[in-house]
């Protein structure tokens, strides 16, 4: 079992990878990222699969974000 510092909630992970939680759930379900149960919650393991994971911009929201200029 990974150390508690080696896991992320799906919400935290989505913010880090700039994608939706559903994208991460799909990636976990098809084996692209690893998860563990911690206290009844499904958490993402920060390992080499997590480091290599990149979401594919396919959904409407992702396309919309990609088309929006970044004003800073």
Image: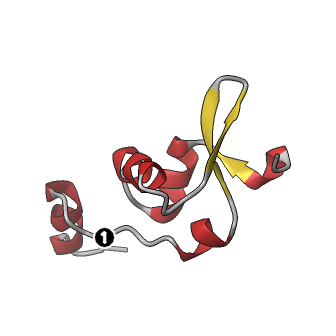
Q: Nearer the viewer, residue 14 or 24?
A: 24
Residue 52: percent from left, percent from top: 55, 76
Q: Which residue is mark 1?
A: 56
* Residue at 55%, 53% in the rendered image: 13
* Residue at 42%, 46% in the rendered image: 25
| Image-quadrant location for residue 68 | bottom left
Specify the farthest residue to the right. 3
Circle 1 packing at 10 Å, graded few (<14), some (14-19), many (20+), is: few
Element type where label 1 sits in the image? loop
In the picture, measured across the screen, residue 33 lies left or right of residue 48, that is: left
Residue 38: percent from left, percent from top: 72, 32
In the picture, measured across the screen, residue 68 lies left or right of residue 43, that is: left
Looking at the picture, does residue 4 appear above or below residue 55? Answer: above
Specify the farthest residue to the front. 30
Number of numbered tags placed on the structure image: 1
* Residue at 85%, 49% in the rendered image: 3
Looking at the picture, does residue 64 appear above or below residue 69? Answer: above
Residue 11: percent from left, percent from top: 51, 43
* Residue at 57%, 48% in the rendered image: 12
Position of the C terminus by quadrant: bottom left
In the picture, measured across the screen, residue 71 lies left or right of residue 32, that is: left
Q: Nearer the viewer, residue 44 or 32?
A: 32
| Image-quadrant location for residue 55 | bottom left
Residue 32: percent from left, percent from top: 48, 63
Model colouring: secondary structure
In the picture, measured across the screen, residue 31 lies left or right of residue 46, that is: left
């Amino acid at each position: 079992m990974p150390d508690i510092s080696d896991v992320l909630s799906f919400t935290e992970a989505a913010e880090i990878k700039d994608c939706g939680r559903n994208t991460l759930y799909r990636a976990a379900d098809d084996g692209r990222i690893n998860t563990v149960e911690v206290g009844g919650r499904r958490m993402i393991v920060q390992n080499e699969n997590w480091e290599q994971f990149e979401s594919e911009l396919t959904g409407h929201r992702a396309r919309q974000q990609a088309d929006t200029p970044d004003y800073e």
